[in-house]
Image: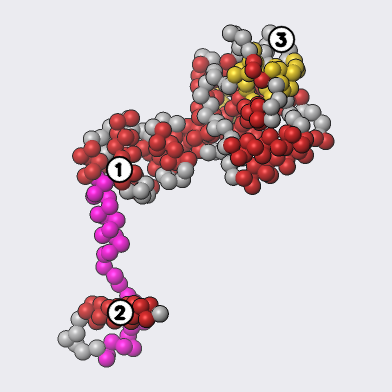
Amino acid sequence: MAKSVLANALKERSAKLSAPPSNADQTVDEAFEGLFGTMPATSSKPRSTAKISLEQLHPFFTSNIGFKPYSEENLKMLADDIAENGLIENIKIRPCRTGGYEILSGHNRVNACKMLGMDSISADIEYVDDARAIVIATVTNLQRRQNLLPSERGWAYRALLDAYRQQGKRSDLVNATCGEIHHKLKARERVACFFGVGVNDVRQTVRLTYLIPPLLDAVDERKLNMMCGVAISYYDEDTQKLFQKRLHAENHRISVAMMKHIKKNCPPPSITAAELDKVWHQVTAAQTEKKTGNISFSRRRFEPYLHHIPPDMNLEDLFLEFLENRFAESNGMKSSR
């Protein structure tokens, strides 16, 4: 997260000082409408609020939701804001079966409080099952964090969809409302509707989570085109390692068109190193040929000069001579400076 983005987020956070409480967003829309709208959100005990020792808090471990902690610099900015304005919003936790509490929302706030030397923090204690814990942990981050990485969104969406499937529900959902139109929405469509994103955005970012870590990092760092990453995700782990090696050697230079050609000629799930090398050379050679193919000019624009050219003179040789003289003059001017 960029420093300026975090600063803006902290300003928005400070603005909540005068805002009325939202009952914690009705516990994240009652845990995403009872996990996608077909079951009531129930718990054995109502939520409560308490001061909790930081030593009793454990990072979220129920599922891999993929959110990365703040850098030390950004964490220091958050700590400074808490020192000045206090904790604007309680963290969310739930009791662990083995003692202590699992953090659902507020990992960075907990770390910032530790940086300040605090020993406790205000928390909303939620008594929810695993599925709703995943909803709270993912939705709060997806809705409130800025500039999330593709991998962070992908892991969050995947955690939600996995939680839904583990509930044993049908995959062709339910009586859901989007605007005033009633549809039977699939789980992916329901997630997309809830967050106001496209279904393809959910599908593609979830696919990224099937990449091996080095390739997923390359997508996050914008070294590897996201659509190329999605295409590579359909290959098995060994093949992805071949792609990683090749991309590293090529400084991650691969276009969507190149990837489509590779996928068409060497479809998933697996290809050999020799097959990848062969198709890679084919597509790069084709691109080179495309760049260096025949060059054409408009005859109409050159018509006034053509009658000055002797009939035995080759136009290609004439143009080449002109370019050589032009760039020789240009280089001579640079060297004389």
Dot 3 or dot 1: first in sequence order is: 3
Looking at the rendered image, the disc whose residue lies closer to the viewer, 1 or 2, is 2
Q: Is residue 301 left or right of residue 17?
A: left
Dot 1 or dot 2: first in sequence order is: 1
Instruction: Specify the principal SS of the magenta part.
Output: helix
The colour style of the image is secondary structure
Is 217 inside the magenta-drawn segment? no
Mark 1: give few (<14), some (14-19) or many (20+) Cα within 10 Å: some
Q: Image point 70% across, 40% down: which residue?
A: 10
Mark number, residue 246: 1
What is the CA distance from the residue labelled 1 to the residue labelled 2?
38 Å
Label 3 near label 2: C-beta < 8 Å?
no
Front one among 67 and 181: 67
In the picture, which quadrant includes the N terminus?
top right
Q: How many marks?
A: 3
- Where are the magenta residues, as a range? 279-308
Q: Image point 27% across, 64% down: which residue?
A: 292
The part of the image, by quadrant, that contains residue 95 is top right
Above or below: residue 145 compared with residue 118: below
* Residue 189 makes an appearance in the image: no
Front one among 236 and 16: 16
Question: What residue would you read off at disc 3?
Answer: 45
Q: Residue 132, percent across and down?
A: 61, 18
